[in-house]
Amino acid sequence: MVLGTYKEAISARATDKAIQNVAQDGGIVTALLSYALEEKIIEGAVVAGPGEEEWKPEPLVAMTPEELISAAGTKYTFSPNVWMLKEAVRQYGLEKVGTVGIPCQLMGIRKMQSYPFGTRFIADKLALIVGIFCMENFPRASLETFVDEKMNSSLESVEKMDIGMGKFIVNTQDDELNIPLKETHGYEQAGCNVCKDYTAELADVSTGSVGSPAGWSTVLTRTDTGASIFKDAVDAGIIETKSMDDVKPGLGLLEKLSTSKKDKSQKEIDKRRDMGLPVPF
Amino acid sequence: MSEKIVISPTSRQEGHAELVMEVDDAGIVTKGRYFSITPVRGLEKIVTGKAPEMAPVIAQRICGVCPIPHTLASVEAMDDSLDIEVPKAGQLLRELTLAAHTVNSHAIHHFLIATDFVPENLFATAVESVSEIRKNMQYVVDMVAGEGIHPSDIRIGGMAKNISELARKKLYSRLKALVPKVNDHVDLMAGLIADKDLPKGLGVHDQPIMASDKIYGKRDFFDLDRFTEIMPESWYDDADIAKRACSTIPLYDGINVEVGPRARAAKFGGFSEKGVVAQHMARAIEMKTYLSRAIAILDELDTSAPVYADHDPRGTNKLGIGVIEGPRGTDIHMAQVADGKTQYYSALVPTTWNIPTMGPATEGFHYDYGPHVIRAYDPCLSCATHVMVVDDEDKSVIKNDMVRL
């Protein structure tokens, strides 16, 4: 299946205006983790919090909804959340942990749960894993190149980043700048080129903008845990939903992009294998 | 007619050791000798020439029974060599780690001696409470020091991280809830040990006791000038034993001593009993003392205070001394750091102190009681071994030129 195993695909957004205001799209990650926190399904969550420098996120063990909101929004560069899980379980004392990650991070987490070497008593403490759709991820230096060099602006002034309609877009206080997405090629993390997972297939719940209209997110519920927490959050009025059939551009676009990532990566994998290079898949 | 009774290896202890008892016609021990036959670890040589932060990481791997005391003694020695003052909260977290570990370690010992004292109908109860206590105490070590077995977050300069307020409250309430369990367990074990009717005076000896502190360990206590270390060759008057014994003999003021729970209780608690039963009692009572200290630390700990002191790791070649009261006694590590590298490292560990005292302590009673005397010390051999067997044929160490590690 091109979208991985899932129970339900649905378009959704957070009903809380405070979340909508800071969210990248529908605010699903923030809303879902906040709901899990308030309902004591989790005691805290490892999220990509604000770092010392702009657009350099650092893992944050969020234990309040306010801390979760401080971490809202897509960063496009890596936050090593998996690294923080151990500290969340140890010094922070969390016994039920939520986290959010991109597909490659979830591969690490699921592998850790299968083979908990060096992660004793950590894997079993993960109560909710939210995944985000991801085509590629950039080192911070790449973001700096896009904004400082290609757009002649500066990262410090950027308020929001987005990818859509074939463009890499940034919003500064008074301007919207963009470059064509093809100009970003070659600046992504090297591993992205051999990654075949677009929709975070190993998550409890996956979410991302593709397939839903602006301000909404597409949600794939995957595991029993994920589906039941999501359903409860909807029932509680934290999240509102629309059928995927009723929204544009719909699930078709998600399937198309997921297929293209799989195909493109398979080509790269084959190419590397032909050259005798090791590939992880 | 004297006969030799040899128990090799002695059982229900960590590491391999041999108990050789000369007995008279009635089977009474006239001469007891106890010595380590565990292969050498050599960790002091491994850490020499490496960066100082390597020492605690390697030292804790000397043995899986005492990783916490060794890590702590190692960082304390390094702190001293590098002239670091650890922040108060960091010091409290270290003490909390040790207190929790000690309760856990004493509980393990109760499991080891269970077949000596616990009747069948109470066996499951005793083992169950050992497990419950261990689970909770190891949870504390996990939280505070990163890992229960090889703590990753005890660092030179303090601790890697303070614990969160949530963790502090959790640990506090869990340990409070554990108090009745530990009290019942201690009462059960103390009662059973008292009921066992071991011969009066078993294991009593006249050697002095040595302890640095009631709970954590004090480096000022250790006076290097009063300490001497001799080779087993000049200690054991039996040539066969002398060449196979793998631990050096440490002496304080020129004589062998006893370290451990009874020594601490005698020096800091006015405890005057001696011998096997007294050692078991002192150990059992320590479980209560250490648990209440752990709870007190969690009560007073400021979770927002710094726990780590920035420091210059290059060093001035000062001899640093770290003294920790481990479950089995005084654990002393010594280290010198210069040019950012460990120049000298030595570990002087609890059971090493006890080894020369344990053998003679079996004297005067039937050899059947020999193992009881040995187990009362809760010996743990692997860290004690410092001399390498160089001849595999006859298992001997080279006299006088023996390789010291």
Image: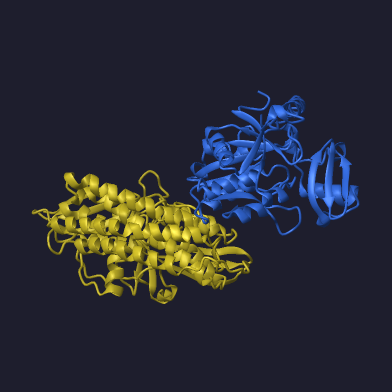
Residue at 50% x, 51% y is: A94
On the image, the x and y values in percent for residue B77 come to: 50, 67
On the image, the x and y values in percent for residue B117 come to: 19, 51
User: Is residue B263 or residue B158 the one in the foreground?
Assistant: B158
In terms of image quadrants, where is residue A32?
Answer: top right
Chain B pictured colour: yellow
Residue at 90% x, 48% y is: A151
On the image, the x and y values in percent for residue B277 come to: 19, 61
In terms of image quadrants, where is residue B380?
Answer: bottom left
Is residue B77 found left or right of B370 in the rendered image? right
Image position of A164 with respect to B73: above or below:
above
Q: Let me know if residue B17 appears in the view.
A: no
User: Is residue B395 or residue A21 the one in the foreground?
Assistant: A21
Is residue A93 found left or right of A10 in the rendered image? left
Image position of B338 with respect to B178: above or below:
below
| Chain letter of the blue region | A
User: Is residue B293 or residue B168 the one in the foreground?
Assistant: B168
In terms of image quadrants, where is residue B205?
Answer: bottom left
Q: How is the image coloured?
A: by chain
Q: Which residue occupies the extreme left position in the image?
A: B26
